[in-house]
Amino acid sequence: MMKTALALCLAISLSACNQQEAASNIADDQIAASVNDVIISHADVKSYKAAKNMPQANDKQVLEELIATELLRQAANDSNLLERDDIRYQLRLQESEFMARAFMRDKFSKMTFTEEQLIKEYELGGQDKSKTEYKARHILVKTPDEARAIIDALRAGGDFLSLAKERSTGPSAVNGGDLGWFQAANMVPEFASALQTMAAGDVSVSPVQTQFGWHIIKLEDIREPAKPEFENVRGQIQQSLLSKAINDYMENLRQNADIEIRK
């Protein structure tokens, strides 16, 4: 048995539909049930299954759900629930949200784009900077004074690998501070932020503090990810164009509306 719990607004909508059908003298063979003279038709059962995207659902179970919903709607009406401000607001809100979703789905669900549009969007698309990879080394020490002393030693001609092996407290010390290739997202935020201000070959000009201590960073190289093949991202490109179309439409609505925002 399906759970007997539908939103009150759906129940009210169903009732309104039923009353309209009753007023139009729906044929007896199209009536699935009546609940205190409110008609539930076979069309209601079919429409409910379509709305809930469950075409294989058992008609009898769906009918029981609709009967239970109608009983609850009638009980809610008898309780004067609709006189409460919070309930009326929720109904208005749900109606507005439902109509907005239905309108956007109707307007944009069948939107298509030409091959030329897709290719142009693909060619305009830049590299995903979040996927940029860095190759770096670091020296990790416990205090900022130690870090500044190492920076001074490097400026005086000290060898980064040697200093990392001698002075770093991190596990990469044995490899001269080598961290290999990685994406910025794989590092703590302070370390990642420092990297993104550096160019290949740069060494930290000041110590970088993280939860682990104080770092001196040497950024050895940067590489961008290979651009994916067009066919592999066709769906993403279509979604990108659709999002732009929706954003443009919403912006046009705002520009042509009389909107006053008060503090």
Image (tube, rainbow, N blue to C red):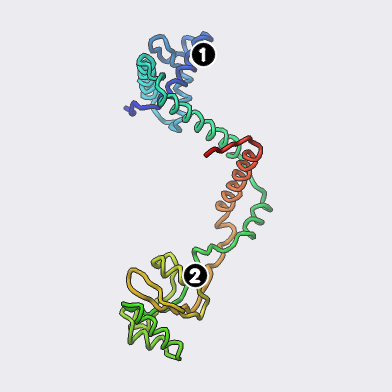
Residue 256 horizontal side relative to residue 148, left or right = right
Residue 201: x and y in percent read: 51, 81
**Dot 1 crowding, Cα within 10 Å, few <14, some 14–19, many 20+:** few
Q: Provide residue 143's location: percent of width, then percent of height.
A: 32, 77
Q: Is residue 170 visible?
A: no
Q: How far apart are marks 2 and 1 (CA)?
A: 65 Å
Residue 76: x, y in percent? 37, 18
Residue 204 vertical position relative to residue 7 in the rendered view, above or below? below
Mark drawn on residue 20: 1
**Residue pushed farthest right?**
116
The amino acid type of the residue labelled 2 equals Gln
Q: Is residue 183 left or right of residue 241?
A: left
Q: Name the residue under label 2.
A: 196
Snapshot quadrant of residue 175: bottom left
Q: Which of the pair 17/183 is nearer the observer?
A: 183
The answer to whether residue 253 is above or below residue 46 is: below
Q: Is mark 1 on a helix, strand or loop?
A: helix
Q: Can residue 227 be seen in this view?
A: yes
